[in-house]
Image: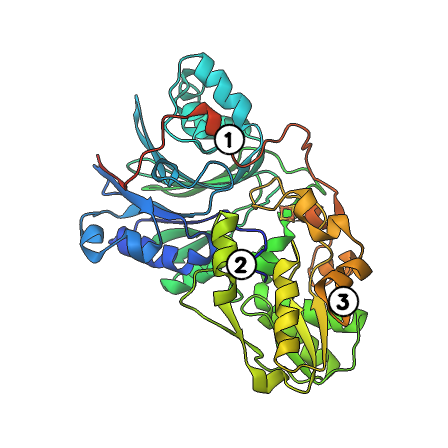
């Protein structure tokens, strides 16, 4: 993946019915760190008291062992954040905690609520005070709203008011809930560890704590784990043929050792690489993956083409995933530190770079130049997703349409800009070819075929002007 590429939103992890929930959540969030590096937090309950800790930073920076000892309990939820709505500041770090008249609610969200602004405005006009500039906070107001609080199936009714993409973990002092939006944009799965229940954005986090994968939370489903067991209900009836799981999760975001939407991420990427080799064959000496997310597709390309794969790029693991830093200045400042060329692998060779996507094009251009400087005879680019021409409004922090190189140029013009000898993208049909279902995916950033109306969708900073007083520094630490 290019460091210029779209960024992920967040990772969720929750447990119910397991001693030392905080220790498990720490491990689970650690496994999900690739999904967000701006902030981390957890809320834990022993059935009586709810305690939370959260701050800007990596999981390992936010939590010390002494902090975990101060978070006793057998249930809890955790979150790693990359901001797609609301800026990077302490108040926006999740889980959000709200004290309603009937007790504490904590929520952790992955996605983008496309009607958050109108809901926020409605509550603010009625006198409500918001503490953050995130879209997620509107759910706490819906849960506290007497209109919903007094009715049965309160959480389902509140979730039904939300539009856009979401996977939510919710918590009270004695139960944990998990929900996915009716179109299923975001991944969320259920696992078992002993008698306890685990929820996670990706199965790699289940494996991290030795939990067994049970199934995905279904689109439109609310799952509740409490002392009476595990309960499932639909807050929204599924619409046949209307499922929009984010295909970019499989192309790039998820860890290759995860299962996402019932598919092995590594196997899917290998299959994409094989398909890409069939669609865009090339005579060359070596396949060079862009680590890490290009590795599996490069392996597939090598298997299909018979061209050996070798590690022509080495990643510096001590530089953060630059794509995940929200500000362009941070990205451009650290991009050249992330990868280095191994000259022996490419010198005097015809090289094929295999990557998962090209977004702006500036990073790919730089890498092509590096290989030429290191002595490559030819540099060819093969991309395991179609040209990205349209922004995402569903919780992935894409650049604007104008910044997407494929929205401004055709493939030949992109090749020319990048300075490559050839350029081949997998087709849209090829992108869906490895998956059991060819219709249950959102492909809008490639096809422009948005699964929901986007005409009134706001950008990442849309809620900032609603909360100008929140520019405070420092960690948020609460104990209830
Ligand atoms: S537009 Fe692209 S990145 Fe956004 S949800 Fe759809 S497939 Fe995923």
Q: In which quarter of the image is residue 458?
A: top right
Side of 287 where 320 appears, left or right: left
Residue 83 visible within the image: yes
The residue where tag 2 is placed is: 254
The residue where tag 3 is placed is: 423
The residue where tag 1 is placed is: 159
Q: Which of marks 1 and 2 is in front?
A: 2
Camera-side residue of 230 and 287: 287
Q: Which of marks 3 and 1 is nearer the N terminus?
A: 1
Residue 426 visible within the image: no
Q: What element carries label 2?
A: loop
The mark found on residue 442 in the picture is none
Q: How crowded is mark 3: few (under 14 residues within 10 Å), some or many (20 or more)?
A: many
Are the two marked residues, 1 and 2, in contact with CB atoms closer than 8 angstroms? no
| Residue 20 in the image: above or below residue 183 | below
Query: For disc 2, does the CB lie below 8 Å from ligand 1?
Result: no
State the residue at coordinates (71%, 52%). 405
Q: Is mark 3 on a helix, strand or loop?
A: strand
Camera-side residue of 17 and 422: 422
Q: How far apart are marks 3 and 1 (CA)?
A: 44 Å
**What scheme was used to colour the molecule?**
rainbow
State the residue at coordinates (57%, 46%). 396
Q: Earlier in the sequence, mark 1 or mark 2?
A: 1
State the residue at coordinates (48%, 32%). 135
Q: Earlier in the sequence, mark 3 or mark 2?
A: 2
Q: Position of residue 176 (x, y in %)?
A: 37, 41
Q: Which of marks 3 and 1 is in front?
A: 3
Q: Where is residue 462 in the image (x, y as percent from the top left)?
A: 53, 30
């Amino acid at each position: 993946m290019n460091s210029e590429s779209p960024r992920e939103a967040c990772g969720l992890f929750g447990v119910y019915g397991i001693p030392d929930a905080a220790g498990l959540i720490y491990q689970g969030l650690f496994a999900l760190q690739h999904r967000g590096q701006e902030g981390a937090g957890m809320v834990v309950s022993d059935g009586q008291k709810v305690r939370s800790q959260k701050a800007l930073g990596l999981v390992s920076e936010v939590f010390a062992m002494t902090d975990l000892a101060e978070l006793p309990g057998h249930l809890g939820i955790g979150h790693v954040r990359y901001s797609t709505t609301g800026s990077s500041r302490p108040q926006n770090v999740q889980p959000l905690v709200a004290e309603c008249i009937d007790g504490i609610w904590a929520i952790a969200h992955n996605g983008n609520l496309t009607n958050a602004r109108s809901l926020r405005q409605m509550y603010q006009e009625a006198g409500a005070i918001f503490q953050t500039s995130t879209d997620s906070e509107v759910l706490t107001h819906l849960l506290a709203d007497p209109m919903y609080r007094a009715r049965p199936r309160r959480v389902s009714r509140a979730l039904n008011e939300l539009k856009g993409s979401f996977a939510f973990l919710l918590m009270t002092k004695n139960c944990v809930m998990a929900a996915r939006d009716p179109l299923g944009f975001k991944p969320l799965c259920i696992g078992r560890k002993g008698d306890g229940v685990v929820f996670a954005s990706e199965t790699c986090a289940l494996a991290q704590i030795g939990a067994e994968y049970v199934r995905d939370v279904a689109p439109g489903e609310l799952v509740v784990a409490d002392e009476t067991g595990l309960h499932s209900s639909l807050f929204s009836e599924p619409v046949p043929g209307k499922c929009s799981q984010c295909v970019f999760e499989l192309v790039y975001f998820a860890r290759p050792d995860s299962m996402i939407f019932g598919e092995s991420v590594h196997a899917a990427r290998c299959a994409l690489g094989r398909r890409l080799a069939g669609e865009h064959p090339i005579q060359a000496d070596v396949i060079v993956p862009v680590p890490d997310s290009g590795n599996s597709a490069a392996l597939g390309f090598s298997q299909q083409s018979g061209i050996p794969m070798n590690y022509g790029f080495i990643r510096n693991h001590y530089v953060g995933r630059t794509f995940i830093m929200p500000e362009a200045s941070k990205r451009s400042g650290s991009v050249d530190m992330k990868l280095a060329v191994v000259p022996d692998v490419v010198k005097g060779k015809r090289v094929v770079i295999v990557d998962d996507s090209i977004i702006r094009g500036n990073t790919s251009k730089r890498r092509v130049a590096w290989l030429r400087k290191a002595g490559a005879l030819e540099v060819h680019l093969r991309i395991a997703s179609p040209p990205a021409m349209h922004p995402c409004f569903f919780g992935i922090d894409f650049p604007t349409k104008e910044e997407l190189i494929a929205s401004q140029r055709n493939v030949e013009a992109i090749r020319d800009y990048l300075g490559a000898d050839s350029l081949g993208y997998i087709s849209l049909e090829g992108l869906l070819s490895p998956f059991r279902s060819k219709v249950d995916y959102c492909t809008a950033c490639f096809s422009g075929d948005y699964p929901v109306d986007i005409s009134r969708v706001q950008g990442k900073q849309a809620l900032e002007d609603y909360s100008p007083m929140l520019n405070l520094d420092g960690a948020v630490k609460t104990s209830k």
